[in-house]
Amino acid sequence: MNIRANILLRVYLAFGLIVLFAFAVLLRLGDVQFIQGHKWKAMADSLSTKEFDIEAARGNIYSVDGSLLATSVPEYELRMDMLAGGIQKKEVFDTKVDSLAMKLSQFFGDKSAKDYSRFLRKARQDSSRYVLIKRKVTYQDLKIIRKFPLFNIGKYTGGLMAIQQNKRILPFKDLAQRTIGYLNENVKNPVGLEGAYGNYINGESGKQIMQRISGGVWIPVNNEAEVAPKDGADIISTIDINMQDLAQSALKEGLIRSKAHHGAVIVMEVATGEVRAVANYTRVEEGVYKENFNYAIAGNQDPGSTFKLASYMALLEDKMVDTNTLIGTENYRLPGGHTIKDSHGSVGTVTVKKAFEQSSNSAVAQLINKHYGNDPIRFTNHLYDWHLNEKMKLQISGEAQPVVKNPKTNKSWNKNMTLPQMAYGYEMQLTPLKLLSFYNAVANNGKYLAPIFVKEIRRLGNPIEQFKARVINDKICSDETLSKIKSMLEGVVLNGSGKLIVYNPLYNIAGKTGTAQVADDNLGYKAKKQYQASFVGYFPAEKPKYSMIVVINDPIGEYYGALVSGPVFRKIADRIYASDVTMYNSVKQNMVGNTTAPEAKAGQSKATKQVYNAFGIKALYAAKSEYFNSADTSNGIAYEESTPTKGVMPNIKGMGLKDAMYLVGNAGLKARVKGSGKVINQSILPGSRIGKGLLVEIELN
């Protein structure tokens, strides 16, 4: 054999071996793909599963009266597995897919039946395992959809997959929205009760096994979780939904009337420190206000004249002055040249009580500078002893740090100006809630409480934690000082700056007006003048139950506290007072001269009994007839039977027109009616024989 033939033989042999190997590979691929495919697919699926967390339903937030402020409702994303066990057979799918398409079209109304049919058939052709049908489907809708063709074959085999998601809703929409708050992963600081009590409300996540399919999509292996999530606990807040509604509507009305930029209202129960309402509004466009920022707890600004309460309390406590001490209200010139004057003009030389009632800046600046000018730390020590410089450690986050200067630690302390300006609420920063809490301490006989927003946490209806207001200071001042301060606060409304707007003759309000010029960022007070108008107080003055503050910023036109914030305070206080009988249960009851039971119209017995029972009136029912007349007796009210008899004229005297016409019509009579009220006369006497079609004249009065 020559060399060429030897080489060709070897080539053919090598090529043959390669062909045989390729053929063997193809055979093996076919075996794996078609014969052992199910085995390896199942193994692949088992290796492509993963355990995922399932979000728990968050707990509810309730108002103090049991109204639902925030809750979680299930919302579903509907998807379909086109290769589910019950619809794998082509004839099953083809027979019912058009019926399903028609049902989906009718129910959702977003596509025609043909479009749905085309969509479903295309998904089936593509062997899709996780086709999106609809998002944001309610549980009630889901119950109906489960009965649709194909979907009703079986819970796991009909192809329908309902992916539950929890949606947070506020039944009262914007009521107390900022206080309720929200929990958002994109927001670093928690907001409101939702954020502060997230650990309780969130609950415990469940576990569900998910399977990865082509395209990297994860689908649930089962429609139910392997480990069920544990729902969150419920929060019982201190908010009263009716007071909240009242506070928000009154504040918004006041802001619109004043064309102000923003404002806040807080209502608090005196004895408990429980916040009943918090309203905050910011102008977003002309005449439109929204709750974008919680000014009540985070809005730090100069309080203005409302701070004079603390100044006079210090003076009285140190016995520097008494309420009858005389003081001039003329312009007061400071050593550095600055002049303090009253915008409404001097009222001459008056008592300390009168100066407070008329909100004289000049008077309080003189008094503080005169008695504490050589020892300002003595004055600021009072403020620090009252903890006005400290946060109140509220249950919700966002509280601003108060700013109260003292000559030792503040480099900005001006020896000529800081002390007298602090006297009437400048060169410091306090939030509305901080200031209200101080006034609430006066109403609470000196007990200074940190306000609370949450009373209780419950799980499955059982309390697991309860809260009471923390006592900041057991007694802010002596009873003697407290009595004088209360009298001065009442005087503001009875005789002073709040008399024309806030005074109500039906009950007494104690409080203080406040007007402060607000610095315009870094431009100071000399830029465009902006004002903060406020009124803070409590009611009823003799036995305080609620304290309240109203703060309105940057009003256009009138800017005095009494004129801008006073009407809002008065409106809210009046409505609360009118709706709470415990505040006026001492009102004298005057009995009217006629104390007999009220007269009732004759007529249907069922309606009459219902009315008398509702009023707790004793009645003697001597008849069981459907209709009767009534007559007064010494023992109550006795009813005379008035049973209609066929062919006999019924007694309709004393009845209302509705009952009288019913009986006359049933007797076959025609009626002519004159007057209004109850029947006093009928032209056919009761008991007379009658026939159909007769005319009866009915006179009412």
Image (cartoon, grey):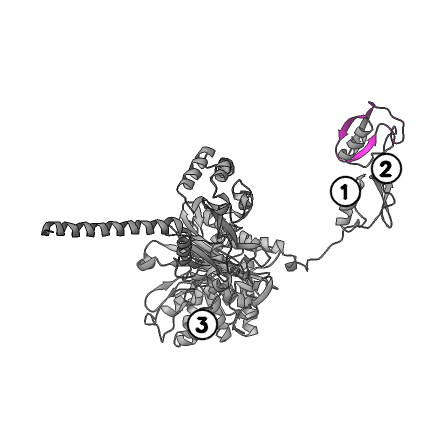
Q: Tell me if 695 is positioned left or right of 325 in this view.
A: right
Give the crowd class for mark 1: few <14, some 14-19, many >=20 residues within 10 Å: few
Q: How far across and how far down the image is residue 397, in percent? A: 44, 63
Range of the magenta residues? 669-695
Tell me, for residue 607, which label it has, or none.
1
* Image location of residue 116, percent across then percent down: 45, 37
Say which residue label 2 marks.
642
Between 569 and 456, the one nearer to me in the picture: 456
Disc sitting over residue 383 in the figure = 3
Which of the labelled discs sits on residue 679, or is there none?
Answer: none
Amino acid identity at mark 3: Leu
Q: CA distance from mark 3 to mark 2?
A: 79 Å
- The CA distance from mark 1 to mark 3 is 65 Å
Within the image, what quadrant is residue 118 found in? top left
Q: Nearer the viewer, residue 341 or 241?
A: 241
**Placement of 23 over or under 197, stated as above or below:** above
Mark 1–mark 2 Cα distance, whole angstroms, equals 15 Å
- In front of the other: 355 or 310: 310
Numbered disc in front, either 3 or 2: 2
Asked whether the beta carbons under mark 1 and mark 2 sit within 8 Å of each other, the answer is no
Give residue 173's position: percent from left, percent from top.
50, 50
